[in-house]
Image (spheres, rainbow, N blue to C red):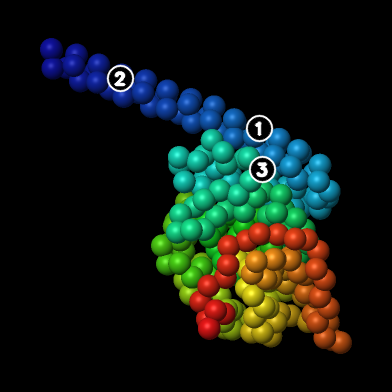
Amino acid sequence: MKFLKIAISSVLILFVLSCTRNQDNSVQTETYKKLRKTMVQRQIQARGVKDPKVLAAMQAVPRHLFVPEAQRNKAYDDRPLSIGWEQTISQPYIVAFMTEQLGVKPGDRVLEIGTGSGYQAAVLAQIADSVFTIEIIPELAKKAQETLTELNYKNIIVRSGDGYHGWKEKAPFDAIIVTAAPPKIPPLLLEQLENGGKMILPVGEYVQELVVVHKTERGMEMQNILPVRFVPMTGEIRK
């Protein structure tokens, strides 16, 4: 009888702890949801991003799950954050701004160079049909894949490799986004862009400009739209 009482007590304690954890998780989820709403309103909409698809994507993706646990209290701040290996997750406004400038539509196939944490890919995947993303640092590619799998993103394919070469087997792409700065635009990426498609990327070294490339039947139309500061693109582009 004594053993039975102890067993019942243990079950009750586990049940209470489980309920408490679930309640804590629920409160935490709601808190992050409110922080995301504030982020979208004050950091993104207030600065002129208007595309409802982009705003909805930024509201939907849990940015705090793409940063190291020790930095989750800063996840919705208006700044980039370190994700290790001398890389960063971009400022939320920049992610939204680049996504809007790219003009991603439902049905589009998008190539991303520089997976990083996987956050930008997740935002794109809320809108596009599919996202193909390449990360040169194997550890980051693995971590991003794990995060995206846990969040049940089925339309993102992550590959570890040098983004300078693009992803020829999956080309052409309706849109290409580069989230690390090459000193010049990689020509292979231009080749893999669909006619009528757009590419956005930071270009430069000490001074960087965000450039939008529109591929037309007449050739490439390029526009510098914003001074930025991104981590440098590494790999063959540096040879």
The disc placed on residue 188 is none
Residue 60 in the image: state x and y as whole percent: 65, 45
Query: For the residue carrying disc 1, how many other residues have a C-alpha within 10 Å: few (<14), some (14-19), or many (20+)?
Result: few
Q: Amino acid at mark 1?
A: Lys
Pick whichever of labels 1 and 2 is earlier in the sequence: 2
> Picture quarter containing residue 178?
bottom right
Q: Amino acid at mark 2?
A: Ile
* Residue highlighted by disc 3: 78
Q: Nearer the viewer, residue 157 or 32?
A: 32
Pick whichever of labels 1 and 3 is earlier in the sequence: 1
Above or below, comparing residue 70 to residue 112 in the picture: above
- Rendered residue at 62%/57% (across/down): 120
Task: Mark 1 vs mark 3: give the one in front.
Answer: 3
> Picture quarter containing residue 219?
bottom right
**Outermost residue, left side:** 2
Residue 239 in the image: state x and y as whole percent: 53, 83
State how far apart marks 1 and 3 are (Cα).
15 Å
Q: Nearer the viewer, residue 175 or 72?
A: 72
- Rendered residue at 45%/42% (across/down): 69
* Residue highlighted by disc 2: 13
> Picture quarter containing residue 171?
bottom right
- Rendered residue at 70%/59% (across/down): 228
Q: Amino acid at mark 3?
A: Asp
Query: For the residue carrying disc 2, how many other residues have a C-alpha within 10 Å: few (<14), some (14-19), or many (20+)?
Result: few
Q: Nearer the viewer, residue 211 or 32?
A: 211
From the viewer's perspective, is 107 left or right of 220? left
Above or below, comparing residue 113 to residue 116 in the picture: below
State how far apart marks 1 and 2 are (Cα).
32 Å
Q: Are marks 2 and 3 in contact (CB under 8 Å)?
A: no
* Residue highlighted by disc 1: 34
Task: Mark 1 vs mark 2: give the one in front.
Answer: 1
Quadrant of the frame with the N terminus: top left
